[in-house]
Amino acid sequence: MGADYVNKDGFQKEQSDIIKSILTNRYFNPWKEYNRYDKDENYQKSLQNESKLEIYATAICNQKCEYCYLVKYEDLYPREYDKPDIILNNLKVLMNWVVENHFYIPSIEFFTGEVWHTQFGLDMLQIVYNAIIKDGLQTDMVLIPSNCSFILDPIQTQKIQHYINAYEKAGVRLCFSISIDGKIIDNYRPLNSKTIKTDRYYEDLFLFASRNNFFFHPMVASCNVAQWIENYKWWEEMCNKFNRPIKNLMMLEVRNTGWTDKNIQDYVKFLQFLQTQERNKYNSNEDFLASVFNFNDQDNVCGYVPWALTFADTFPGCTVCDSLTVRIGDMAICPCHRTAYNKLLYGHFVLKDNKIVDIEGNNPEIASRILLGNNNLCSPKCDACPYNPLCLKGCFGSQYETNKDPFFPIEDVCKLMKAKYNFIVQSYISYGAINYLKSISPYNLHYPQAQQFLKILEELKDVGEN
């Protein structure tokens, strides 16, 4: 029995040592590379610039969205830890740990259900603000995805604006990334209070966004994709009315299971609509192609453009690869908020006397795969797929919920992505992209990139027709 105990104890130590080594090299050391006031010309190339902190604060929400995982999967945030008094205390502990280690974290993000319309949300903002002005917390931005339903309450809106102004005065941008899908399809995201969002609500929300230069990130889901052309026209109308750039509208596909052949057809129609709108801005196909390939050296598109041809990075295109995510209620270190299931946790911060004193490791295998692995090569099925160089690929959390394996793709999401890239490839070819790319001179600065695009178009031009 004694030997078994020693072996078990030794195994746990090894688990913890590996996790601490991975997290130290991926996050903790980079956060010490520069301080906020001492950067040189190499800072933009530093891993610190791609190392963020995500505070997974609470699953409490005032909405019940059709496609929301927080609604469907309570295991993502055990309810015994999802209590304001525990969360506020642990948030102070985490901020103290960041300050005491002299970390400079360029961006700190809160992920929550929706609490910014409550005193609980304001209390969290105050804790971070105190850490900035009193304790010397080093960050450039605090980012909060939010449905901004506090706009319904003028008093709460003014309180939020007060914090935005106070953070700015302290040299930190407090930024709300506004999560609404649009008036036409907002019935899929009803408020629990049954309050109806009127035109006045949307106007006040756009005024709030305009005042603070905030942007929107609606989601394109299988349940509402058939209405997205009409919904996009509403977005265009509102953006024009309030002088907000429509090109910054972040329309990411919801990569949950549930995409039917009809949903996918509707999505391809929406992509065709978006692409045609963009093509009509140019006098010729050549000018259009120069823009979409970004060969005209102008900032014509930005952010996530769903109808455009882009190459996949070797890492996932979401926070799972660049953010240290802490589920603050129990101080769990998670791959991301969508994969915060106990089985997948990297580990936990160990607290003693209200201070972080250690890290207990749980799953170095998951940490190694996500933080150290090549996502194009280490995903089963994806590694041998002809769409691999382009594909955004699936969401680890959604794949775990559907397949009980975070790295194995969901069949109907694969069908969605294949239909998407088939459309993009065939549409580019119809605009003359192959001949255009062949015309790029070897002496042109864009020649290597043109050859890369040409190779993928020629490789996939017949795949989508089969």
Image (tube, rainbow, N blue to C red):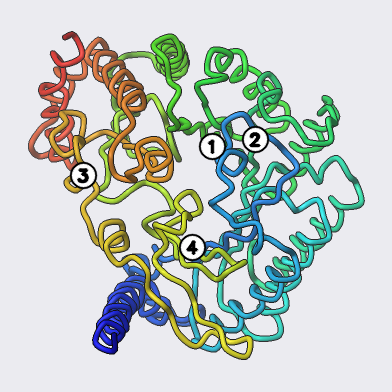
Q: Does residue 43 show up?
A: yes
Secondary structure state at the residue bearing disc 2: loop
Amino acid type, label 2: Arg
Q: Residue at x 62, y 18 (%)?
A: 231
Label tally = 4
Q: Position of residue 430 (x, y in %)?
A: 25, 10
State the residue position of label 3.
376
Between 69 and 431, which is closer to the camera in this rendering? 69
Between the residue at mark 3 and the residue at mark 2, the CA separation in whole angstroms equals 35 Å
Amino acid type, label 3: Asn
Q: Residue at x 82, y 43 (%)?
A: 151
Outermost residue toward the right in this view: 155
- The answer to whether residue 200 is above or below residue 154 is above
State the residue position of label 2.
244
| Res 227 quadrant in image | top right
Q: Is disc 1 in contact with disc 2, using a CB cutoff of under 8 Å?
A: yes
| Res 382 quadrant in image | top left
The numbered mark, 3 or 2, whose residue comes first in the sequence reads 2
Between 387 and 199, which is closer to the camera in this rendering? 387
Q: Residue at x 42, y 77 (%)?
A: 31
Between the residue at mark 3 and the residue at mark 4, the CA separation in whole angstroms equals 23 Å
Between the residue at mark 1 and the residue at mark 4, the CA separation in whole angstroms equals 26 Å
The numbered mark, 1 or 4, whose residue comes first in the sequence reads 1
